[in-house]
Structure formats: C-alpha cells, structure tokens
Amino acid sequence: MSQPPAYSAARGAVRDTLLHERFIGLWRHCFPQSTSGDAEVGWSKVQRHYSEPHRVYHDPQHLAHCLEQLDLANDLVAHPDQVEMAIWFHDIINEPGMADNEQRSADYFRTLTSGTADAQFIDAVVDLILVTMHQSAPVDPDQQFICDIDLASFGCPWECFFRDSSAVKAEFTGTEEEYYRGKKAFLQSMLERPRIFLTDFFHARYEQQARDNIERLMELIEQHAD
C-alpha cells in the first residue's frame, strides 16, 4: 500500500536531515584540517547530485539503505570511515547509459578532497568506489564489504526487491528490449557466482533471499520475452 504524498515527503525530509548530519560528522572526522564550510560544500555537492531528477533508484534512499547496511556490519569492517566515505561518493556521478560512472565518481571524490586528507586515505576510498563496478571479486575485506552493501537490496523481501528493480529500469534510457537483454545477462552472471555476497556476514543474511528474488525476476523477464 503506497503512502500519502505528504507522509512520504515528511519521511524524506527527516531522512535528508539525518543524512546531512551524518555526512557533516564524517567529513569533519576524516578531514580534521578542513573547515565547517568545506563540509557543507561537500554535502551540497552530494545532495545536488543524488537529487538529480532522472534518479529513481540511485537517490538519497539508496544512500540511506547502504548506510544502514554498513551500520549492521560496522564492527566487522576494518576501516569503517573509508568504507562510509566511499558509500557517499560511489554513485555521485550517475549518467544513464554511461559505462564509466564509477570511474568518474572516483575522480570526482579525488578532485574534491585533494589537499584535504592524506593520499593513502584518498587512494583507499577511490579503490573502494571502483570495486562497486562489480566486475571482479575483490580479496580485500573492506572492498568485499562495500560490494555486499551495494548489492544488499537484492536480499530484500520480494516486494522491496521488485520495486527497486522497477526503479532501476526507470533510469534506463534505451529500449525495453535492450534493458531486458542487459538485465538478463547481469542476473545470470549473479546466479553463476559461487556466492553473490562475498562476506560471511552478508552471505548468511541475504544470499538465499537474493537467489530466490533473482530467479523469480528471471522468470518474469522470460515471460516478457515471450
């Protein structure tokens, strides 16, 4: 059952306030030499990009969900500040149809924080952003965690998963045939993995539900093709 627009707007406003406070706190913690103005500039850029009108899935709610997943596993993450900073910036560039969004997001973060933090921290965050391309299975534990966090919505109950899948489809700019062809190939590659979720924590939490969701969606895609 959908919520009334006024209720949804109020929830969104509360979410955005909490996201703002959390981002400012993280920025000041990670970049102690920066000013409060620098933190607000960083937030304004994050807010502006994630609120772009074409975003239906990769929006502030996706950010909030990723941060909730990080909080669940926070005690198991070696460098939670690095992982959280990467979460904030991993989708900051999102141009539908472009294959280099993650690279451009990483470059955006590097440019924004140049001279603000030590190079090792920036390099680690950049690497964490880039692994969310999901092209290969990383060995580094923190990189495994951010990959799992980014895919955590696959392990939601079916209704939530299907809603998210529809939101991803709404961002696609090509034809329906192109979308379903690419989606089917991606989902099949996920099923062929020995594990969708690389960390024991998220594997135990979401693996079976994710596989059930993907198989069910694949059936719907097959029906659409028929």
Image: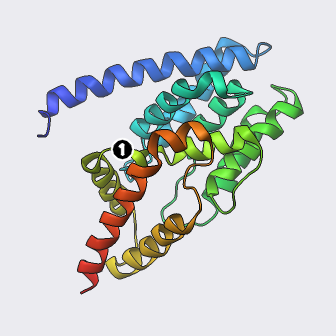
Quarter of the figure with residue 218: bottom left
Screen quadrant of the N terminus: top left
Quarter of the figure with residue 6: top left
Label 1: how many Cα within 10 Å (few below 14, some 14–19, many 20+): some
Q: Position of residue 207 (x, y in %)?
A: 47, 49
Pick the front one: 184 or 118: 184
Residue reaching furthest to the bottom = 226
Q: In this rendering, would 171 be left or right of 3?
A: right
Q: Residue at x 50, y 69 (%)?
A: 186
Q: Residue at x 47, y 28 (%)?
A: 68
46 in relation to 16, above or below:
below
Quarter of the figure with residue 168: bottom left
158 in relation to 173, above or below:
above
Screen quadrant of the C terminus: bottom left
Q: Residue at x 77, y 44 (%)?
A: 140
Pick the front one: 16 or 155: 155
Q: Amino acid at mark 1?
A: Cys
Q: Position of residue 122 (x, y in %)?
A: 80, 35
| Secondary structure at numbered mark 1 | loop
Q: What is the image's colouring?
A: rainbow
Q: So how many labels did they put on this image? A: 1
* Residue at the disc numbered 1: 156
- Residue 55 appears in view: no
Q: Position of residue 21 (x, y in %)?
A: 51, 15
Pick the front one: 107 or 57: 57
- Residue 164 appears in view: yes
Q: In this rendering, would 223 be left or right of 149?
A: left
Q: Position of residue 185 (x, y in %)?
A: 48, 75
Q: In this rendering, would 1 be left or right of 48?
A: left
Q: Residue at x 71, y 37 (%)?
A: 142
